Amino acid sequence: MMIGARKGSPLVLGFSDDECFLASDAAPFVDHTDNIIYFNEGDIVTVTRTRDGDKCKVVYSVTDLSKVATNPTVEKLELTLEEITKGGYDHYMLKEIMEQPTAIKNALRGRLTDDGIRLGGLNQLIERPNGEKLPMIDAICK
């Protein structure tokens, strides 16, 4: 049995007759299935595998937080592995460059406050000659 719940982050179920996957994006399913369900906030999915003779069968049920059964829409995943890896760009590097604003926005989500930027976990500080204390960041470059 596998149970998934959507709270905040996306939740997607990918499934075929004999296997199923839960993830926050449909990309991992491309090589395995084209049947997917995107869940709504508060949805809870329970997935089981049953035997039908010598075949496995995937069975899922979906409820909301009030335990009311819902009937989500099964969609066909119309992506190829090639489309996902390059995201429609001619080159992977171009994709990475074009995604930088989104990557930065995602990295800063929850860290920008009215008082400034909050970088949790950076508790080591270095002191500048003017007395200002700054986070010390260690990095390894290869």
Image (tube, helix red, strand yellow):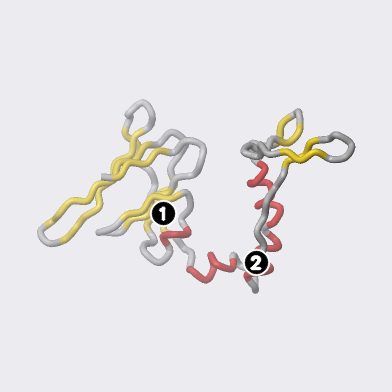
What percent of the width, then of the height, locates residue 57?
21, 55
User: Mark 2: few, some, or many residues within 10 Å (few <14, many ≥20)?
Assistant: few
In terms of secondary structure, where does tag 2 sit?
A: loop
Q: Position of residue 37 (x, y in %)?
A: 40, 49
Which residue is tagged 1? 75
Looking at the figure, which quarter contains the C terminus?
bottom right
In the rendered view, would you say 71 is above or below 58? Answer: above
Which label was assigned to residue 5? none
Q: Residue furthest right?
A: 130
Which amino acid type is marked by label 2?
A: Lys
Number of numbered discs on residues: 2
Mark 2 lies on residue: 142
Question: Against 115, is 136 above or below?
Answer: below
Residue drawn at 64 percent across, 46 percent down: 107
Residue 6 is situated, as x and y percent measured from the top left of the image, at 44, 38
Residue sitting at 76 percent across and 28 percent down? 115
Viewed as shown, does residue 61 lie left or right of 13? Answer: left
Whole-number angstrom distance, CA of label 2 to CA of label 1: 43 Å
User: Which sits in the foreground, 9 or 58?
Assistant: 9
Residue lying at 36% horizontally and 53% vertically, measured from the top left = 21
66 or 48, which is in the foreground?
48
User: Toward which corner of the image does residue 4 lie, by quadrant?
Assistant: top left
Q: Quadrant of the N terminus?
A: top left
Q: Disc 1 on helix, strand or loop? A: strand
**Which comes before the other along the chain, label 2 or label 1?**
1
Residue 93 falls in image quadrant: bottom right
Q: What amino acid is labelled 1 in the image?
A: Glu
The x and y percentages for residue 138 are 68, 51
Whether residues under marks 2 and 1 lie with C-beta atoms below 8 angstroms apart, the answer is no
Label 1 packing within 10 angstroms: few (<14), some (14-19), many (20+): few
Eye-nearest disc, 2 or 1 = 2
